[in-house]
Image (cartoon, rainbow, N blue to C red):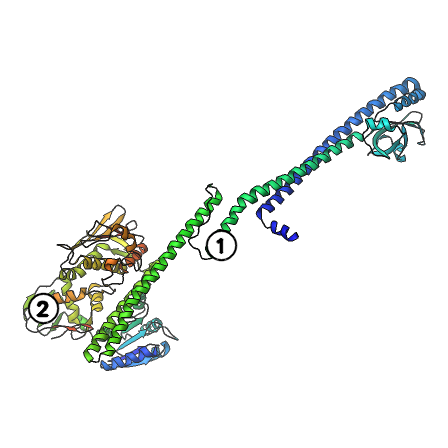
Amino acid sequence: MLGSISALMKTTAARLSALYLLLFAICAVGLVFYMGSLTMRMLTGQIQDTVSEEVLSLGRAYQRGGLTTLVRVVEGRSRQPGAYLYIIADPTGRILGGNVQSLEPQVLGAEGWTERPFSYERYGEPETRTADVPTAREGPHMAMAVVVRLPNQMILLVGRDLGEPERFGNVIRRALIVAFGMMGLGALAIWFLVGRRALKRIDNISDASRRIMGGDLSGRLPVAGAGDEFDRLSQNLNEMLARIGALNEGLKQVSDNIAHDLKTPLTRLRNRAEAALARGNEPQHRAALEATIAESDQLIRTFNAILMISRLESGYSAENTAVIDLSAIVADVVELYEPAADEVGVALAADAPAGLVISGNRELIGQSLSNIVDNAIKYSAGFGEHPRVRVAAKRSGGEIVVSICDTGPGIPPEDRARATERFVRLEQSRSQPGSGLGLSLAKAVMTFHGGRLELSGENPGLCVSMIFPAGDSPAP
Amino acid sequence: MKLLVIEDDREAAEYLEKAFDEAGHLAHIAADGETGYTLASSGEYDVLVVDRMLPRRDGLSVVAALRARGNDTPVLILSALGEVDDRVTGLRAGGDDYLTKPYAFSELLARVEVLKKRGGSKDVETVYRVGDLELDRLSHSVKRAGKEIVLQPREFRLLEYLMRHAGQVVTRTMLLENVWDYHFDPQTNVIDVHISRLRSKIEKEFDTPVLHTVRGAGYMLKA
């Protein structure tokens, strides 16, 4: 029982309900007591007014006919049913007349209003009293009274029974009980509404996330469709999960590709060494060793490219950036590759105005541009009648665009986004030598320079655009 | 040539010692930076080959300390770090050349031999001559057997570099570095094609070849 209560208190709903209940109770008690004391004071005031009235009327009777008239009037009024108290006593406090049998003795000692309600006992007239004064209890009653000393030292007390204010107290008590009952119901309703509906959804979310943590990465958090904060939370978390999933998938893809791209040359390397061992002559050994070295170099190149991309992506130090001349780099690379292109029948041409300067790293840009030009020549060679590669640079708005367009088979639009991913070599290019990292490296280099790499062009033909921001470049 | 190899990888050091010996050079080995610094301070070596990461004292600090004491023995820095920044840091510390591991020994040998020559003062010559081939650095003219040969600016610089290091093996990466001033791996045969163009210009109408291909290493200009 205790355990289940403490478990219940662990839910937000129960805590909220308890807190509401407490706050409402404090407010309600405060309010009821304020109202009660206000009403009490009003009622007491009324009692004092009526008692003063009665004293005045008795005073007039005393003036009219002295003590005997007063006693007669008091005796007369004492016999009438009602809430009034009358006492006539001698100076020592001995009761001579009235309707009170006994009372707290010190009451008659002081003059004026009694400071607080006092208890008294009336001469028994139970049937009339129960009719007018509905305090059904036996024993002494409570009353308030005023004590007046007559000129001949006799004492007159006029008071009023407090039965009616007590009844009012009962009303207030009942109101309090009803209020507490309603508050309890309210707290239950809050617990039910908040707990059963809203917090149930948080439980659903935490259940779903536990399942996802358990390995079901395709799982998603429930969205109720109400568009409230729970739905927004779930939607955001779902988007985050989708992003994590995509990254995870990408990582897996890359690992698979790495495994494939490294396993193939390693296998070739191993087979070649084994074959050379089996054969036994000197020139064949030599050829096999040379091929082994060439293959190892290719592997090392691949690793270097991977390391370089990682380094660029993980925040390469910008220490070696300087103001560099893009036009000169374009001219250099085209000049470097022109004879090689010519040899395979590809016309390589540059179209770059002088003075395109940016802030960047000459080596990185030179290497990326070389890789792209190298690819363009490789894929254009022998494709179409007049294979061409054109490297153009121009200022376009706030950007400088270096585009390398070839007349090769191109890349279908749907494959273009994948082409710049690490290790992705589209099926048609698997047969070509290379690490498959050229475009990924170029993309990483462009990101490092605050630019981007775009692939375009209609089939056949591919345009790779290196887009640099020209914002901070000095005017030529 | 007398070399000091400061390298803590024992196997690599022994391999280098043996390979340099086969190439006709004497190589001493120091296994840590402190020993290397002490040996190099003697000034008796033609070239120092210094690994970057060494126990007791790292390679760059050895080079910097030698330079600070006025020792200008040519230094080739070997490093597993191959980024642009690393090269720049290496050269800034006082290195004369920088080679990334793993490397072909032929590449290291070619570079070391070129570094040793740098100690001499061939740079001040204005006219290079190899056999009947003549290159005038001031007038930018090339003649063979007295006959003018017209070269493109880049071809001129290529020939100039080859002639300055005539009789020495020059690798493809050395050419890309010194003639084009880029330090990446050209991967494909771009340099070879430039060489064959140059070769056709300086050899076509003449009987004797001067620009030789050194198998597995690079090129050599030799009469």
Element under label 1? helix
Residue B187 shown left or right of residue A21 in the figure = left
Chain at tag 1? A
Give how far apart the Cα atoms at labels 2 and 1 are: 76 Å
Residue A107 shown left or right of residue A457 in the figure = right
Q: Is residue B43 visible?
A: no
Q: Amino acid at mark 2?
A: Ile
The answer to which quarter of the image holds residue A188 is top right
Name the front one of labels 2 and 1: 1
Query: Mark 2 near mark 1, Cβ–Cβ under 8 Å?
Result: no
Vertical relation: B79 (above or below) B25:
above
The answer to which quarter of the image holds residue A435 is bottom left
Most distant residue in the top direction: A64
Q: Nearer the viewer, residue A353 or A116?
A: A116
Q: Which residue is mark 2?
A: B202
Q: Is residue A381 visible?
A: yes
The answer to which quarter of the image holds residue B94 is bottom left
Q: Nearer the viewer, residue A225 or B120?
A: A225
Element under label 2? helix
Residues behind callouts 2 and 1 on a single chain: no
Q: Which residue is mark 1?
A: A210
Q: Position of residue A355 (x, y in %)?
A: 21, 52
Residue at 24% x, 65% y is: B185
